[in-house]
Image: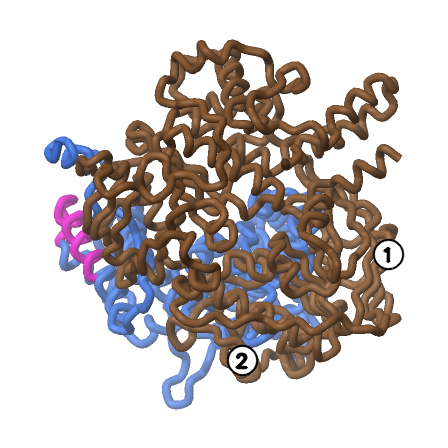
Amino acid sequence: MISLIPRKDIPLALTVMTPIMAIAITLFVGAIIFATLGYDPLEALYQFFVAPVSRSDQIADLFVKACPLIIIASGLIFCYRANIWNIGAEGQLILGAVFSGYVALTFPGLPAWAMIPLMVIAGIFGGMLWAMIPALLKTRFNTNEILVSLMLTYVAALLIDWIVRGPWRDPMSFGFPLTKMYVDAALISRIELPGIGYLGQLHWGVVGALLLALCAWFVLDRMLVGFQVKVMGAAPRAGRFAGFSPTFVTFMVLGISGAAAGIAGMVEVSANIGQLQPEISFGYGFTAIIVAFLARLNPLAVIGAGLVVALAELGGDSAQITLGMPKVVTGVFKGILLFMLLAGETFNRFHVEIRPSRSSAAKSVEVQN
Amino acid sequence: MPAFFVDIGVGLKSFAIIKSLSMLFLSRVISFASPQLCLYPLPVDYGRWPLIATHPLEAFMKARPRLRTSKDTAKKTGAAPAGDQMPLLNASGVIKRFGDFIANDNVSFSIYEGEIHALLGENGAGKSTFVKMVYGLMQPDAGVFEWRGKPVKITGPQHARDMGIGMVFQHFSLFQALTVAENIQLALPAGESLSSLSDRVRIMSAEYGIGVDPDARIHNLSVGQQQRVEIMRCLLQDPSLLIMDEPTSVLTPQEADQLFDVLRRFSNSGVAILFISHKLDEIRALTSRATVLRRGINVGTVNTDTRSARQLAEMMVGETVADVVRKTAPADDDILLEISNLSRPRSTQFSTPLRNISLQARRGEILAIAGIAGNGQDELMEALIGEWRDANNGIMVIEGLDITHAGPTARRNAGISFVPEERNGHAAVPAMSLADNNLLTSHSLAGAVKKGIIDNNAMRQAADDVTTAFDVRLPNENPLASALSGGNLQKFVVGREIAKSPKVLIISQPTWGVDVGAAMFIRSAMLKLAAKGSAVVMISQDLEEVFMIAHRIAVLYDGHLSAAMDVTGLTAEKVGLLMGGIAASKGAEA
């Protein structure tokens, strides 16, 4: 019988070593898979881990890629800490993009100092609105928020599809499902570093993402509302005993995560796309779930987890482009990486104890008799 | 001669339903419920006892030759065995470790046929670990068990049952929606029909005075009866050794006495009983020998005759035990908290409705609400905390301030503190630090939260103050609540509330599952709080505790709360009757 026993004290060295070990094992297993499939394993690993970050502008792009993941995951952590399972960040992201797009497209004459903040507020509003639906249904009718939030994602995807093909389509788009380009004031500008200039696609949204993760940490760790979220998740009965309202917490965490996803949608469109189109997110809302759990629901660790996941994405792209590796193989490799990291986490918190199974104990009795 | 109160209780439950039926039937029920009807001594008058069918006892006894009927109801049974007799079960040098923690350290122990042997020890002394090994739920790391002189390795509960070891757990494992016979059938090897099993239950019920109706549904039975179903289930497997884990913790004194009678009959018929408890008086009343465990070590096996309860307690704790001193009840009628006409409808099938509960807690007193678990304590506690509230039911006033509509936070701000029964997940969050657990009930009070930001230093300081003042022993510097032992966590959650110097402390089962030393500490802390001018409302099913510290006692039975009675001149007998619902029967007859 194999059982996992929680460790009482987790030595710091182990905490540091586990991700390193996990990556080492991933490299080893990956090398075997690549070799079996006929690729040069060293070259493949190079494309995965080194090529995407071999230049400073590529490192900057890694942060750009991680930006929406970090924003969304910072919000999702509130939900998951409270044991509320919001799976619909993708839909909330789309609504955030749509609402901020409304501001950008309807009031193109706004000055730059008002435009971006208004778009952020609109994005927050859109994301929250979409997240309030599962919250309302859960608190009123005890529906399952997993199903509701997930299904609303598809509603949101169809909504933006209709909007960009129908009412908001740019008449000059030659029939393509695109809105007008945002005015310059509605675009998030790239960061111009003194002495270096622009670095890849690095934009101010990345700074915003890091600040948001920091804020999320402060709220969750230092503020009473964060404490309410944690208590409700860990022991709902103790939460009621403390006088916290489960309804309030449900609304709050879904609101926070919806708002975060909405901001991510706004940033993604404003910084990278510049107009609304049917596809504005590449599964960021879903990938952020992985990021949140990889970070063990810790907002500060979300930054690192977001970067790791973004690296796996970019590395997969790089391997596909340079080696012609099929997408499924890169997908498998990404899966192995995440699996190893999570397994490493598990072994960090638990140690394995192997005891003789019951049947072998029974055998020893027979021997004794 | 103890009357059969529990079945009377059931009679009364059905009484409400049949009230409207004919007077003829009514009188039948009342005569059935009258205290003159006693099940003891055997043989049972089958004609008068409708639950037990007449049945040829002889046929049954032929099938089970080992169980001898005995009409001997001597107070003490199983006197210390002669030296040359072979023990039924002998354990020598048993060691069980959990990581670095040694739960059983070189425990040696023996029990003889027909002996009632107590296993005595504080919470966490290793009693449960030891019996779990005897029952095959765990394997010892070292040491030998001998069964009838032969070394055995008990591989699992099924093996233990095959050998003839039965165990009644503290927490019952009965299906509430099934009948007694169906529940028993599930535990026995397949193949026996329900009707023949029902007959066997009736016979055994009669033989040992257990009084279990095989056709009754479990959820209609009292806790005491449910326990007897568990016992019956073990007994039908014909055990030579019956292990009982804290069996009296859920019983009224009268029910406990009945249980003891039943156990004495078993032991007279040759069954050995290993009786686990920390209640010293009952151990002295029931058992002949006691093995005392302290922190996993066998402190010794003693004849219970030769030791006083205090001496046994000191063996258990390893140090002298201080008594709590209760001051006389305050003379003035300064009412701090008043609750009137609190009713609560049944929320689930198995919950108890509250019926018109009124109580007054006066300054300086401890008001105890006695009663057996499951008579509305949980529902009452939820209503008192404010987790459940209903504007149309009941009025709750503290010092003139109406808090009927207030939630837990507002009630705390009004000066009431609460300690619910369940420590893990209700009074405390197991996965959080003590500082966070302190914040749980003080987040609305001064100094805890400023502009939404938690003052972690203040919370840590407050938690440290509680651990120091209440002698909470911590396994490391900054442990999670789950790392504390039950008694220490209880001291923490009680201390956390008392440290706030509340006007009213409402506390449920304050020393449930807590060792003797900690229990005494908590009780004297409550007395000190009352002496300083607060009111304490204590919901407790531990009568010993109720009589030890309460100034007034009210009894909760089936959602009714009796009037509070002054403790002077009150007997355990009378409270026990109320706990069994007898006063209500008089009301019904009148």
- Seen at 17% across and 49% down, the residue is A34
- Type of the residue with mark 1: Ser
- Seen at 59% across and 58% down, the residue is B426
Main SS category, magenta section: helix
Q: Where is residue B38 in the image (x, y as percent from the top left)?
A: 65, 29
The segment highlighted magenta reads A24-40
The chain to which mark 1 is attached is B
Q: Which of A124 and B118 is in front in this view?
A: B118
Chain B drawn in what color?
brown
- Seen at 52% across and 18% down, the residue is B203
Q: Are marks 1 and 2 in contact (CB under 8 Å)?
A: no
Between the residue at mark 1 and the residue at mark 2, the CA separation in whole angstroms equals 36 Å
Q: In this view, does A102 lie above or below A366?
A: below
Q: Is residue A36 magenta?
A: yes
- Type of the residue with mark 2: Ala
Q: How is the image coloured?
A: by chain
Q: Where is residue A46 in the image (x, y as percent from the top left)?
A: 19, 62
Q: Is residue B87 left or right of residue B539?
A: left
Q: Is mark 2 on a helix, strand or loop?
A: helix
Query: Splitting the image into 4 quarters, where does residue A22 fall?
Result: bottom left
Chain A drawn in what color?
blue
- Seen at 35% across and 22% down, the residue is B66
What residue is shown with label 2? B469
Q: In this view, does B98 lie above or below B19?
A: below
The chain to which mark 2 is attached is B
| One can see residue A311 in this view | yes
What residue is shown with label 1? B340
Q: What element carries label 1?
A: strand
